[in-house]
Image: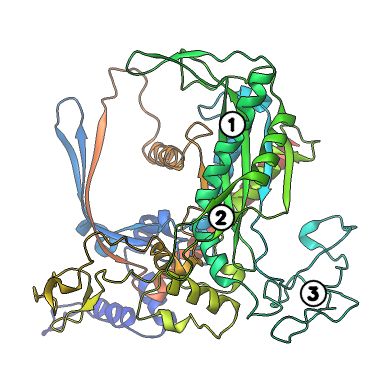
Amino acid sequence: MTANPITGQQPQETILGLLARSRDVRLQAIGRAARPDFEDWLSHVRPAAACTRPIRLAGTMDRIEAETGRLLARTNTRDLPDGVIYKACGNRRATVCPACSERYKRDAYQLVRTGLVGGKGVPEDVARHPAVFPTLTAPSFGEVHTRHVKRHTCGNRRRCDCRPEPCHARRELAFCPHARRLVCFARHEETDRVLGTPLCLDCYDHDAQAVWNAFAGVLWSRTTNTVRKFLRRRAAERGIPFPIAVTRTGNFREVDPFRLSFGKVAEMQRRGVVHFHAIVRLDGVDPDDPAAIVPPPPGLSAADLVDAVTHAAAVTGVRTPPHPDRPEGWPVRWGEQLLVKVITAAADGEVTDAMVAAYLAKYATKATEVTGHTSGRLNTATIDLYADPEGDHTARLLDACWRLGRPAAGTRQPWTCPGCDRPTLLLACPTCHLERPGGAEDEADEGEAPNPYTRLRRWAHMLGFGGHFLTKSRRYSVTFSMLRQQRVVFRRTETSGPPTEGPDETPTVLVVNFLAFVGAGWHTTADAMLANTSAALAREHHEAALQDLAALAA
């Protein structure tokens, strides 16, 4: 074959280049599959093959002997297919990346269940520790369309076909101050879009709901402190001795005879407000080893946990800081709906460890999708696309977040540099170094308090809720980092084989990466299609192998 006298490329290389630059996805796929390094490319992208928008990294990777510092090997991404390394995005939201969210959900399941049955470094005795599963909801900010089934007769709640009750059936004609009837006789289906929307948008307190979402984490923290105080009083009443522990400074102090370990997941309701599903586990305290997880004292049981959580949910409240629109602030309390169930570590209980772990892991991958709002972080250029004080329910919530989170009078406002059109809060543009018009005249007045609600603008796309959707106390269970590190070790062992037996024959090797972010997403649509297809085939092969092993074991 004769090379092109102008480009010096072989005819086949020229054709592959034309196919790769084609707008037709089928031609792009043919061009990629026809390349001689196609098999190497599939193997190279396998760790991120199912990701929707993988991260592309470029640089070098060194393998260094830990004892001597000798460089054993160096890999440059220029020598790899596409010249980059593909890393899965790791996004937890199912609407953003289904593959990464599925992995996050499985990790969340292991994290939650380990805290109930033990394993992965957690003592297995925790399976006998008292634990409860409370569900804490927000109060009512106005009447909304609901779906309520008084008595379930279905065998599977996921496919529930039971007949719901009428939404808001009233014999008398109830009218709101805006002359709207507060009556609805419809029996809403599960997929009805009207669910969660107010009967009267003007009567609904959107400001209070946005503030409640913003301070829900503070309310949860106050609630856990109230639970501890309740159990402390009950332990004193029953004569349970309080152990004496030694502090870091060498002093002695009396500590509680118990320790509470929490795991919590936030779920966004259709009306746009979060409510919490939590796990509260009762542990003991070893004064000689504060990090140890030991059984609780005999005088406290799961019934005491139920009483403590019920009491805390009823009496705990928060008064938010003053706001220019509401100088007295907003009261933040839990709603009347409270459900506390005892968790059992057996398969015949009402709520088992597996059921709780699966329930919490499912909601750990969700956010505001149930409300119909799925935007990213909002700013002054995009807020008008979603927020509307006269719009629907979600648009009014977004408007409330943006309006209540406005900067205080006198604080520095963002400005756009006339040289590079870059928005910034600095006094000088970091790119063009042009000074802000007016200089420091826009600075806040000395002694003026800033608006404590400014975080509402930062989390407006989450309807005001800025907390993590899955949190836990330090000693409840393992961490996501530990699970990810175990996965990395497993993959390296699977690739390079098990280490040679004997401590003197296997030197410690450090992997040092010098990688930089160069982009996100696949180069072409065909690359995404081929990678996702390869990952789907690998999953089917894995599931078939598991079924065959289960059949052989049976």
Q: Tell me the crowding category of disc 1: few under 14, some 14 to 19, or many 20 or more residues within 10 angstroms, Cα based.
A: some
Q: Tell me the crowding category of disc 2: few under 14, some 14 to 19, or many 20 or more residues within 10 angstroms, Cα based.
A: few
Please identify the quarter of the rendering in which residue 274 is found.
bottom right
**Residue in the picture at 74% in, 30% down:** 303
Question: Reading the chain from its start, which is encountered first: label 1 or label 3?
Answer: 3
Residue 265, image x, y percentages: 58, 50
| Camera-side residue of 318 and 130 | 318
In the rendered image, which residue does mark 1 sit on? Answer: 229
Residue 52, image x, y percentages: 45, 66
Residue 189 visible, this orientation = yes
Helix, strand or loop under label 1:
helix
Separation of marks 1 and 2 at Cα, in angstroms? 50 Å
Please identify the quarter of the rendering in which residue 85 is found.
bottom left
Separation of marks 1 and 3 at Cα, in angstroms? 43 Å
In the image, residue 11 above or below residue 292: below
Foreground: disc 2 or disc 3: 3
In the rendered image, which residue does mark 2 sit on? Answer: 539
Identify the amino acid type marked 3.
His
Please identify the quarter of the rendering in which residue 356 is found.
top right
**Residue in the picture at 51% in, 45% down:** 471
Question: Reading the chain from its start, which is encountered first: label 2 or label 3?
Answer: 3
Quadrant placement of the N terminus: bottom left
In the image, residue 280 above or below residue 316: above
Q: Tell me the crowding category of disc 3: few under 14, some 14 to 19, or many 20 or more residues within 10 angstroms, Cα based.
A: many
Residue 358, image x, y percentages: 65, 47
In the rendered image, which residue does mark 3 sit on? Answer: 188
**Residue in the picture at 57% in, 57% down:** 331
Question: Reading the chain from its start, which is encountered first: label 1 or label 2?
Answer: 1
Identify the amino acid type marked 2.
Arg
